[in-house]
Image (cartoon, grey):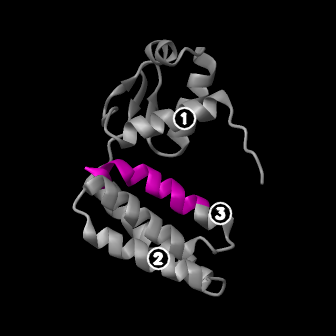
Amino acid sequence: MSIVSLSTADMLAQELRRLINNGSLQDGDRLVERDLASRFSVSRIPLREAIQQLQREGLVEVYRNRGAVVKTLSVTDVDEIYQLRALMEGEAIFQSMQYIDSETIIRAELVHKLLGSTSDPVQQGLYNREFHELLYRKCKNQRLLKMINELQQQIERYEIF
């Protein structure tokens, strides 16, 4: 069992990502470093690193002399992300199939049934993500899986609501 130690910046990025995806921080909201540093009781340096991380992931836009804001995706952005996800997830599932086991298939069938049995949009989103991850988790291409995850994170806030 490996233990992964996250830096303060990584933990802040994780929390900011969660706030964006659950709607607490909405499209166009400013990320004021001073306020966020106070809220999380951290210095501005790791907070700045976290914001830069979210910028690389496509969740935040940083403007010179104006600060950072939660990025708003256009309809075209969303369409392009879904097109890319369809291509990449299809390839990941194709690669995963040679390594998939019966336990994973049984779990995927169960999650698919649960997905169809709930009307709660948040729970549907969780089941949907788990279903897809079960199908391609055995893919050996780590870069492909990382890209899929980054695209999912960019669009997750629009899938939940």
Q: Upstream in the sequence, badge 3 or badge 2?
A: 2
Estimate how packed mark 3 is, as few (under 14), some (14 to 19) or many (20 or more) residues with alpha carbons within 10 Å: few
Q: Is residue 102 above or below residue 136?
A: below
Magenta part of the chain: 146-161
Name the N-terminal-most of marks 3 and 1. Answer: 1
Q: From this viewpoint, is residue 154 visible?
A: yes
Q: Tell me the CA gap for discs 2 and 1.
A: 30 Å
> Can you tell which of label 3 and label 1 is closer to the viewer?
1
- Which residue does the numbered mark 1 point to in the structure image? 13
Q: Tell me where residue 91 appears, x and y as whole percent.
A: 54, 79
Find numbered disc 3 in the image and state the secondary structure of the residue it sits on: helix
Residue 155 is covered by the magenta coloring? yes
Task: Return the residue at label 3.
Answer: 143
Residue at the limit of the structure toward the left, as seen here: 119
- Give yes or no for contact between labels 2 and 1 (Cβ–Cβ under 8 Å): no
In the displayed structure image, the side of residue 101 where residue 116 appears, left or right: left
Which amino acid does the dot numbered 1 rest on?
A: Ala
Q: Residues within 10 Å of mark 1 (few under 14, many from 20)?
A: many
Q: Nearer the viewer, residue 57 or 22?
A: 22
Spatial distance from mark 3 to mark 1, Cα to Cα? 20 Å
- On the image, the x and y values in percent for residue 1 come to 77, 54
At a point 32% along the width and 42% down the height, the residue shown is: 72
- Image disc number at residue 108: 2
